[in-house]
Image: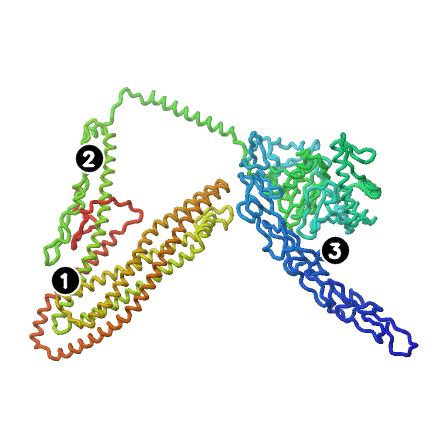
Amino acid sequence: VYCPWAPPSADVTACPESYYCPQGSLAPTLCFNGTYCPAESEIYRWCPLGYRGAPDSNNTYGSIADACEECPAGKYGASPDRLSCDRCTPGYVCLGATTSATPASRATDNGYECPAGHYCPIGSSTELPCPKGHYNPNTGASNVSSCLPCNPGDYQNVAGSATCKSCSTSSTSIDPGATVCTCLGLNRGFQPSDGYCTCDPSFEFYDENYNVQTGDGEVDCQPVVYERCSDSQVRDQTGDCVDSGDCSSQCGDDGGTYISSIGSCECNNLDTLDEVCDADCRAESSYITANGDGTLSVCDSTGNCTDVDTADIDGFRGAISCASDDCSTVSMDSTSGGIEGVYGLSSSIGTEARRRRQLQATGGDSDHAQTAWRQERRQRRRRRHLSAMGWFPDENGDFEFGNSTITRSLTANSSRRTEEIIDDDAADDDESSVATILNPVVCINEGDSIIFDVSNDNYPTYAKDSLLNTNADFDYGDFRDLATAASSTTTISSFGFTFSEAGVYVFTMSSDTSSYIIMSVVASGVACSTEDGATFVPMTEKNMKAINAKLSSSIVVDPDWAIIGGLLGGLTLLIFGVVACLYWFRRRAWAMKKYHPPRFRSSALNSDLQLQGSKGSVVKKKKPTLLPGSGAAIAPVDSDVEAAAAKIDTSNALPPTTPGGGLDGASSSLADHLQRHHDVVEQEFLGQRDLMGRLREALEREADELKRLMSVMSLQQLSSKGGDTHNSTALLATKSDISARRLHEANVTDAQNTIFAAIKQLQKLVDVGAGPVSSTIVSEIARDAYSAAEPPGKSPLLQQILSELLTLQDAIEKNLAVALDLEHRRQQNSAAVWQGLSSAHMSTLDQAVIERLEAVNTATNEMDANNARLANVLTTFAERVPAFSGDLGQQENSLVSALGRAQEMQNPALTQEHRQAGLTGFVGLLDQLRDALMLIMGKVEDAQLEQGSKNEEIDPLRKLLEETLGEGIANTEMEAEAKTEVQSEPAAAGDSVELQKPAMQQQAIAESLLEKIQSLLEKIHTTTVVPADAAPRTPRDPTSLALDVGEVVEVDDGYDEDEIEE
């Protein structure tokens, strides 16, 4: 209350909503954001933890609902002023209205720590599961990196797992993070639920006792061979042959119509869907939905729902899951010997739902009451189990067997009264009936579940080898577990299963395989095409075809022995008929008393075939042409072909055929002699190829000699002019040599840079180590990044390495080696020129020029020696590159072939063995390559440093020499101009011209001869190109291939008809 300003006798006023009035207040005070004030508040109240002040309260703070708002999911509210909500701490989940930054309980804090198998980043409103193939054993993870891949030999097919599963003895996993294991046997499918490797549909195997099996094992499975049906039979959905139109096993005495395309019958007198449960009946039936937290919501037609936990259902087997918040679940009953579709609730679900509603009505649905009830249920199970084993209770409620006593507490009176109430309610409900369809066609959506009422004698089994099944990878491990539990002493009452994959499935009764259902699981978002879209419909042809049920044609049947026998019998008769006809004709039509040899054979035997045979061709030699003005022949008269012919051993000549001696021996001898003749001719052609190569080298030397002679003649011609022209020529030649040398050094530098870049590129490819590079190559060959069906192939990384090796080889052989060879030849020509000048006493260079020229030449020779050493190392490496590349290619081809065979065999162990062997081979080769690259890289770097040092030393010397040469050339030109003014009379000039004519004629002849030699070199180069696949050359006598300088062999590609005599 507050006291307004008034006389003391005035009444006090109650503090209104949204205000607070401390003691002694004269006026109410308005609450502020983050607080609320109910009526008659003495002090403001903070918004609860997990809340913040509502930003749109419009100064209305009378209640929490008006003044405060919940923190949204993913945030928590613990701010002292209650003005903000903070993002949830990494490693925790905030469900909304969360009261702590590190919530510990859903009930008290509206949040919880991130569970194992999941991770929760900042601001998480729900935990995120670790992907399949990974696990996280710890709680409170905040990043996906906390999810660890499963080790080789383990797998995990479920997302959000805290552990991995171990592969069974019949399977394995090679790579980390496996979601399934690979079966060791062929034609087997891995079942992630229990690790079994079962035979694929329509496959089987024989155990060590030669018994047919289809379950788990390591032995390869082989196709089931089905019986070939006769004309009066048809094949049913199990693959067996039955009489056409016989539906007694499926329909009983009522019979039915057999549908051959489906392998099933449409029974007569079937109740229609509307007769069993029409649209109103289906709409008013109770229904079940699976929640995301693993519980079931059992609802009646009015929407009144009761949550049921399958763990509370006595005798429940299997599991129900739901990827979303609302998944449909239907009921079926198999306890009566057939599988019935239930519109409504099955017995087990109905009983548990009624128990939950009764507990809610009596207040017994608390956590404490549920825990007590579960303990009592375990005691009842234990009593039934002990009774089945021969243990009987005494008057004190204890169980006695022999001299042993086990004391168990009996059910409390309150619990007994609750059980009696529930049993009475169940009995009342059992009197009511539900709509059922026996052996129906079932249609549900992907992700939906089915709960079966079962017993230890009657439960559904999956018909793996049914020809109607469409999902060969279906994991039916839960159904195997159900069969195992049913055969034990454990009492089972219900079974749940969630269908997560679309397809058509067939389930049969354990007690009667002729009673079965056909189930269609359609993809999410696809409506069922059955009658009225209903879940359970009668098994009619229309409904079966609506779910696309049809027999598989991919089966193996027995051979048709009748056709095979008929073909074999007909072939036998044909053979006997042909033999009989031949015998009859031989005895009747071709009767001959005496053999008369043909006349042509007698004539041939009496002839000397050797005289008639060809002895080869005789080639008339062209007369050797003569050099104009000379009597020397270009080529010697005796050719190598004639010399080779003279060497042929005539002692092995074909012997003459004796009359009457037969041609069989002569034919064999002729083939032998032809082969020897072919070998001799081939050897001679290979010798000619070697001869052509030597001839080319000789012609190159001749061309160099002619160039030197032409240079000397040019100098002699210039010296005939008199004066100091020869000194000017020498100076110009020296300057030209310096320019050519600089061009050579630039070419060598470019070649070294190219080689350096190629080496660096190769080192970049293999620098990570031989092991990782080899692993990458093996992975690329095995096509690990592709699908499992992709065959092995070439490795792109290895092809890149081979390409870079070829680039490096070309840079060494075609750039550096060629540049050094050209410089060597140029230096030889230059030395010859200087030798000519010295011998003719035509050069009188200044002493300063000579000294500087010698200094430059000394430094140049040292640089050439350095380049020669580098070229020797690089050339040795380049010569070994082809063999090394061949080893790499052979290793790759061998691994591709081996992995291809292993893939065809579908043998993972053999694949791993080949991969390891290939990896070892590649590691050895790449280690060699890395060592070689490091060696030549060091040589190239040293050569570049030394060449740089020499360039710094030689450049100043060359500049001084060029300055001296420039001054000398200028002085010589000035002296020549001065002498030109004092020229001789015209007659004297004419005499000089007459003297120069012989030298000019000689130079013209030399130039013409040089052109012919160069043209001939080009032809020889074209002729001596040999294919890579040519036969290996047989070494010849070196003395027969020796050539003198100037010796030329004429090559004629064709023969004129006039020059050949047969």
Please name whichever residue, 318 or 506, is drawn nearer the observer in this view of the structure: 318
| Farthest front residue in view | 403
**Number of the front mark, 1 or 3:** 3
Q: Residue 702: x percent and y percent?
A: 18, 58
Q: Amino acid at mark 3?
A: Ala
832 in relation to 251, above or below: below
511 in relation to 1052, above or below: above
Q: Distance between the Cα atoms at labels 1 and 3?
A: 115 Å
Q: Quick one: label 3 or label 2, which is nearer the N terminus?
A: 3
| Farthest right residue in view | 9
Report the quarter where the N terminus lies. Answer: bottom right
In screen coordinates, is 1018 left or right of 296?
left
Please name whichever residue, 969 or 574, is drawn nearer the observer in this view of the structure: 969
Question: What scheme was used to colour the molecule?
Answer: rainbow
Q: Residues within 10 Å of mark 3 (few under 14, many from 20)?
A: few
In screen coordinates, is 438 left or right of 1034?
right
Q: Distance between the Cα atoms at labels 1 and 2?
A: 52 Å
User: Residue 577 appears in which quarter of the rendering?
Assistant: top left
In screen coordinates, is 289 left or right of 1019?
right
Q: Quick one: label 1 or label 3, which is nearer the N terminus?
A: 3
Describe the element under mark 3 as helix, strand or loop: helix
Q: Look at mark 3 in the image and give the residue it sits on.
A: 107
Describe the element under mark 2 as helix, strand or loop: helix
Q: Amino acid at mark 1?
A: Ile
Q: Distance between the Cα atoms at labels 3 and 2?
A: 111 Å
Q: Residue 86: x percent and y percent?
A: 68, 64
Q: Residues within 10 Å of mark 1 (few under 14, many from 20)?
A: few
Q: Look at mark 1 in the image and give the residue it sits on.
A: 1005
Q: Is residue 1036 visible?
A: yes
